[in-house]
Structures are given as structure tokens and as C-alpha cells.
Image (tube, rainbow, N blue to C red):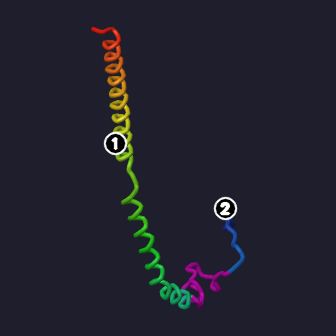
Amino acid sequence: MSSDKGESNLFHLPGKSDKSGGGNHTGNGSPPGGGDMEARVAALEKSLPEIKEKLNLILVKVESIDKHSATKADLANTELSILKWCIGTAIAMISLACAITFGLTKLFNGS
């Protein structure tokens, strides 16, 4: 909410700030980030090979997990196979029980 006097609801937080009063915030013509920017960039560039190596290890592990994990389709096929096996076994057991019953009935009746 600003008025005609140019007031605004913005305020500046304490901490590192630009030394210049200009609107481009470049630090009196210097790049933003302070004088230690080059040292920080050099440290990042120095640690870059280690970061790439760790990233490659992570990618290998993710590919291994993807290769060995089951998908929803795999699980559905496995469930269907187990269901078919259970139904087939139940039918075989009922058939065997009927055959045994039929055989014993014929044996005891003497027909």
C-alpha cells in the first residue's frame, strides 16, 4: 500500500547489503556476491569431480533398483498365476476325493 509520498510496505532486512544506493545492486560496480565469490566458485569447481562421481554412483543404484523391481503389471501377472494355480489345485483335490469316494463305494458295495 503506497501513498502519494512514495511510501511502500517494503522494508530492508539487516545483513549483507549493497553499498551503493543505486537500483542495480551491483556493489559499486563490482559483481554481486562480495569479494570472496571467486574463492567460492573455485571451491565448487574443485569439488565438481567428486560430485559427479557420487551422482554416477546414485544413478547406477537407481538403474539397479529399476531393473530388479516389479511393476504393477508384473505383480498382476503373478497374482493371476497364483490364483490359477490355487483353482487348479482345488479342482484336482476335489476330483481325487470324488474318485476315491467312488472307488470305495464300488469296493464296499461289491458291484
Q: Which residues, given as a range, are shown in magenta? A: 16-36
User: x%, y% of residue 78?
Assistant: 36, 43
Residue marked by disc 2: 2
Instruction: Give left or right: position of 44 versus 74.
Output: right
Q: Residues within 10 Å of mark 1 (few under 14, many from 20)?
A: few
- Position of residue 70 relative to residue 109, above or below, is below
Q: Residues within 10 Å of mark 2 (few under 14, many from 20)?
A: few
Question: Is residue 35 located in the magenta-colored stretch of the structure?
Answer: yes
Residue found at x 51% / y 87%: 41
Res 57 → quadrant: bottom left
Question: Is residue 78 located in the magenta-colored stretch of the structure?
Answer: no
Dot 2 or dot 1: first in sequence order is 2
Res 96 → quadrant: top left
Q: Quadrant of the C terminus?
A: top left
User: x%, y% of residue 10?
Assistant: 67, 67
Q: Using the image as rendered, state which of residue 38 and residue 76 is in the foreground.
A: 76
